[in-house]
Amino acid sequence: MADMCIFCKIANGEIPSNCLYEDELVKVILDLSPASKGHALIIPKRHAKDLFELDEETKAYVLQVASKVGAALKKTLNADGINIMQNNGEAAGQTVMHFHMHIIPRYKGDGLQLFPSGESTPEELKEIRDKVVAELN
Ligand code: 5GP
Ligand code: ZN
């Protein structure tokens, strides 16, 4: 499966990309269809489908890289903010089934709506809380 994976091919250099940063664990590239100017992707070199398959070391490390690269994007592109996003599963908008983290520079008035507000009731929130807390304990 991994030998068919487009992000494995990008990570190992088989497919060219605009690389911003690379080390033994990750490659950071510019997104081909950016949501905003400077939209970048952190791609672990080892194949994992999503967050739930990712090893603990890489899981922790990608956030450090997001912070470092996010700061560089903010400074060099004069961005006003940065969204860090990560989709798991088709229902969540994941289209490439190799874990990746989005770094999306934001500009005042850019109009991007990544997190539209929804609605809930106190009863619904409590029911969800009780289920998840029971699972975590
Ligand atoms: P997802 O929707 O899976 O969270 O994000 C996949 C992202 O990968 C999308 O933003 C898409 O534009 C980007 N993408 C897909 N194929 C390629 C590619 O071949 N090269 C680059 N640089 N980005 C890609
Ligand atoms: Zn892969």
Image (cartoon, rainbow, N blue to C red):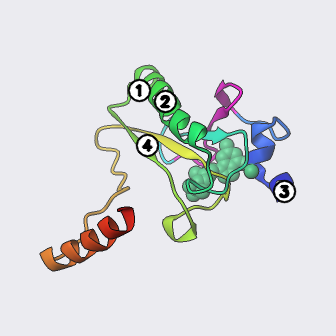
Where does the image place residue 121, in percent across and percent down from the top left? 16, 77
- Confirm whether the magenta stretch covers residue 23: yes
Task: Tell me: residue 98, above or below residue 23.
Answer: below
The image quadrant that residue 29 belongs to is top right
Q: Quadrant of the C terminus?
A: bottom left
The answer to which of marks 1 and 3 sits earlier in the sequence is 3
Q: Nearer the viewer, residue 101 or 125?
A: 125
Precedes in sequence: disc 3 or disc 2: 3
In this rendering, the label closer to the viewer, 1 or 2? 2
- The residue to which callout 3 is attached is 4
As helix, strand or loop, the secondary structure at mark 3 comes to helix
Callout 1 touching callout 4 (CB < 8 Å): no
Q: Which residue is mark 2?
A: 64
In front: label 3 or label 2: 2
How far is mark 1 from mark 2, CA to CA?
15 Å
Instruction: Find the magenta span and give its range.
Output: 18-34
Q: Label 1 belongs to which residue? A: 74
Give the x, y percent position of residue 20. Answer: 62, 26
Query: Residue type at mark 4?
Result: Ile
Q: Which residue is mark 4?
A: 84
- What numbered label is drawn on residue 85? none
Q: Is residue 114 above or below residue 28?
A: below
Q: Residue at x 49, y 48 (%)?
A: 35
